[in-house]
Image: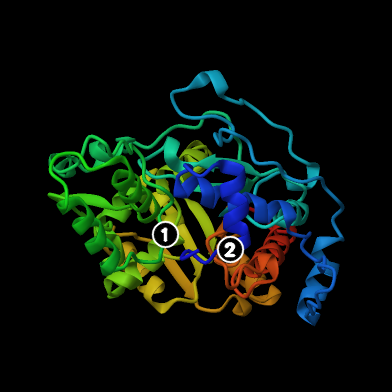
C-alpha cells in the first residue's frame, strides 16, 4: 500500500498469490491485474465520466482508426525478440513486413512493454501494421528492462557490441562481493527506476540486520530482499545497503562513464535522464545491421532522443553519422548530447530542436532537400504515462508525454513520403 496500490488490489493479490509471496511478485500481479481489467484506450468505464479532449479525438480519428484494426499484441515469455546473440537456436532469420513499411528509410521506435491495454495495438496500427519486437535487456546486461520495438530493420546478420557487458550483478560490480550476503541470491537488477529510495528505509534495513548475529531470521531476510529488489540496492558495507550511483546506471545501460555529467545536472537529474534512456547493448544489436548498409555514414533523425542513446549506439557500432537532427525538449539532455558529440570528436553536423512542433512539414522537407533525406528515424516514446509504476498520470497515449508518439508518426509519414521524390 505504501507503493500507492489500493487496499482492495493488495488484498486480491495476496489472496491469489498467497500470504508468503514476495513483494515484487505481488506488485507484478497487481500490474497485470490492472492491465487485464483496464478498458481499451478510448473506452470509458461505466458510471465514470472521462472527458475526451478535442486533441485526443483528432488523434483517434486521424491515426487510431484510419489504418485498420489489429488484435492485441501479446507479450511473449521469454522476451527475446527475434533471437539473442550467441544463441542461434531461437533465432528468427527473416520476417515479412507489410508493403507500406518496407525501407529505407528505416524507422525504429522503443516504448515500455507493459503499457496499458490497447496501446501497442494503436502504435502498431499507426506504424504500418508492423508487429513489435519485445525484448528484456536482462539478456544483454545485469538489469531487466522490458521494452517493445517497432521497426522495419532487417533482422538477418545482427551482431553484438564488443566487449559484451557483464550479465550478472557481481560480475559488473565485483567490489560489492565483499559485503554481499549469501542469502541475497540476486543476479540481476530490476528495471532501473527514477524515484529514489528514502534514507529512512536504508537505515531501517541496517538496524533490522544489526539486531542479529550471523544470518538474520527468514522474515528479516525477506523484508530486506524485497526492498533490495524493489529499489535495486547494493551492499556497500556490513549490513549496509545503498542505491546505485548514476555512473553505475550508465554502466548497466551501456553508456560511457560520466556520460550524463555533460549536462551539468545533479545526481537526481542524471538518474531521471537515465531512467528513460535506451539500453545501448540491446538497441545496438538491432541497429547492427546498418553497419554494412551504410559503410560511408548514415543520416539520422532522432526524435525525443533524451541523453543521446541513438547517437551512442551508432558511435559504438562505428557507423559514421553524416548528419543528426535531434529533437529533445530538456535543455539538460541537449547539453549531454552536445557534450558527447564534442568529446567523441564527431566531424559532421548536429542540429538540435527543443520543440517537436518546430518540425513542420515544410521544415522537414527543407532539411531533407538540404541533406539528401534521412536514412534512419529513431525515437523513444516517453513512457511515463505508460508505466505500471505510475499511479498518478498513467494516461496511455493521450498523456502529455506519451502523446508525442503521434508526432513521431506524423514526422515519419512526411519523411517516407518525401523520400520517394528525392533523387539520391
Task: Report x, y in % for residue 190.
Answer: 41, 48
Q: Residue at x 44, y 44 (%)?
A: 144
Comparing 228 with 166, the one in front is 228
Q: Which residue is mark 1?
A: 193
Q: Is residue 214 above or below residue 45?
A: above
Q: Is residue 212 above or below residue 161?
A: below
Q: Which mark is residue 265?
A: none
Q: Is residue 351 above or below residue 216?
A: below
Comparing 2 with 335, the one in front is 2
Q: Residue at x 17, y 44 (%)?
A: 176
Task: Report x, y in % for residue 68.
Answer: 87, 53
Q: Quadrant of residue 281?
A: top left
Q: Secondary structure at mark 2?
A: helix
Q: How is the image coloured?
A: rainbow
Q: Is residue 269 left or right of residue 125?
A: left
Q: Secondary structure at mark 1?
A: loop
Comparing 128 with 76, the one in front is 76
Q: Which residue is mark 2?
A: 7
| Residue 113 in view of the camera | no
Mark 2 → mark 1, Cα distance in angstroms: 24 Å
Mark 2 or 1: in front is 2
Q: Residue at x 61, y 36 (%)?
A: 154
Q: Quadrant of residue 35?
A: bottom right
Q: Earlier in the sequence, mark 2 or mark 1?
A: 2
Q: Residues within 10 Å of mark 2 (few under 14, many from 20)?
A: few
| Residue 116 in view of the camera | yes
Comparing 308 with 82, the one in front is 82
Q: Is residue 30 above or below residue 19?
A: below
Q: Residues within 10 Å of mark 1 (few under 14, many from 20)?
A: some
Q: Is residue 424 left or right of residue 163?
A: right
Amino acid at each position: 500500500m505504501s507503493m500507492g496500490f489500493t487496499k482492495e488490489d493488495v488484498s486480491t493479490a495476496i489472496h491469489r498469490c498467497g500470504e508468503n509471496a514476495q513483494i515484487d511478485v505481488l506488485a507484478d500481479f497487481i500490474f497485470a491485474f490492472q492491465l487485464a481489467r483496464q478498458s481499451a484506450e478510448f473506452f470509458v468505464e461505466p458510471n465514470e465520466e472521462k472527458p475526451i479532449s478535442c486533441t485526443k479525438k483528432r488523434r483517434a480519428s486521424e491515426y487510431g482508426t484510419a489504418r485498420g484494426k489489429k488484435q492485441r499484441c501479446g507479450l511473449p515469455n521469454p522476451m527475446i525478440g527475434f533471437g539473442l546473440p550467441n544463441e542461434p537456436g531461437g533465432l528468427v532469420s527473416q520476417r515479412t513486413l507489410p508493403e507500406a513499411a518496407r525501407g529505407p528509410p528505416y524507422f525504429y521506435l522503443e516504448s515500455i512493454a507493459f503499457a496499458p491495454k490497447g496501446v501497442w495495438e494503436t502504435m502498431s496500427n499507426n506504424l504500418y501494421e508492423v508487429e513489435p519486437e519485445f525484448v528484456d535487456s536482462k539478456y544483454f546486461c545485469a538489469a531487466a528492462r522490458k521494452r517493445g520495438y517497432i521497426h522495419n530493420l532487417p533482422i538477418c546478420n545482427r551482431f553484438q557490441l564488443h566487449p559484451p557487458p557483464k550479465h550478472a550483478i557481481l560480475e559488473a560490480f565485483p567490489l560489492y562481493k565483499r559485503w554481499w550476503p549469501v542469502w541475497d541470491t540476486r543476479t540481476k537488477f530490476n528495471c532501473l527506476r527514477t524515484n529514489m529510495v528514502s534514507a529512512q528505509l536504508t537505515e531501517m534495513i541496517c538496524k533490522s540486520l544489526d539486531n542479529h548475529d550471523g544470518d538474520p531470521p527468514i522474515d528479516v531476510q525477506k523484508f530486506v530482499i524485497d526492498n533490495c529488489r524493489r529499489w535495486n540496492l547494493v551492499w556497500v558495507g556490513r549490513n549496509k545497503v545503498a542505491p546505485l550511483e548514476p555512473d553505475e546506471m550508465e554502466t548497466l545501460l551501456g553508456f560511457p562513464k560520466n556520460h550524463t555529467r555533460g549536462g551539468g545536472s545533479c545526481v537526481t537529474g542524471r538518474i531521471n535522464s537515465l531512467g528513460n534512456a535506451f539500453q545501448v547493448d540491446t538497441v545496438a544489436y538491432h541497429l547492427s545491421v546498418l553497419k554494412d548498409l551504410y559503410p560511408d555514414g548514415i543520416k539520422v533523425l532522432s526524435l525525443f532522443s533524451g541523453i543521446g542513446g541513438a547517437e551512442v549506439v551508432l558511435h559504438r557500432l562505428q557507423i559514421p553519422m553524416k548528419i543528426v537532427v535531434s529533437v529533445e525538449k530538456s535543455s539538460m539532455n541537449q547539453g549531454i548530447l552536445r557534450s558527447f558529440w564534442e568529446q567523441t570528436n564527431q566531424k559532421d553536423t548536429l542540429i538540435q530542436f527543443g520543440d517537436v512542433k518546430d518540425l513542420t512539414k515544410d521544415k522537414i522537407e527543407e532539411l531533407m532537400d538540404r541533406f539528401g533525406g534521412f536514412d534512419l528515424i529513431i525515437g523513444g516514446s516517453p513512457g511515463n504515462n505508460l508505466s505500471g509504476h505510475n499511479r498518478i498520470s498513467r494516461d496511455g497515449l493521450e498523456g502529455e508525454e506519451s502523446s508525442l508518439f503521434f508526432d513521431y508518426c506524423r514526422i515519419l509519414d512526411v519523411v517516407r513520403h518525401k523520400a520517394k521524390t528525392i533523387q539520391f
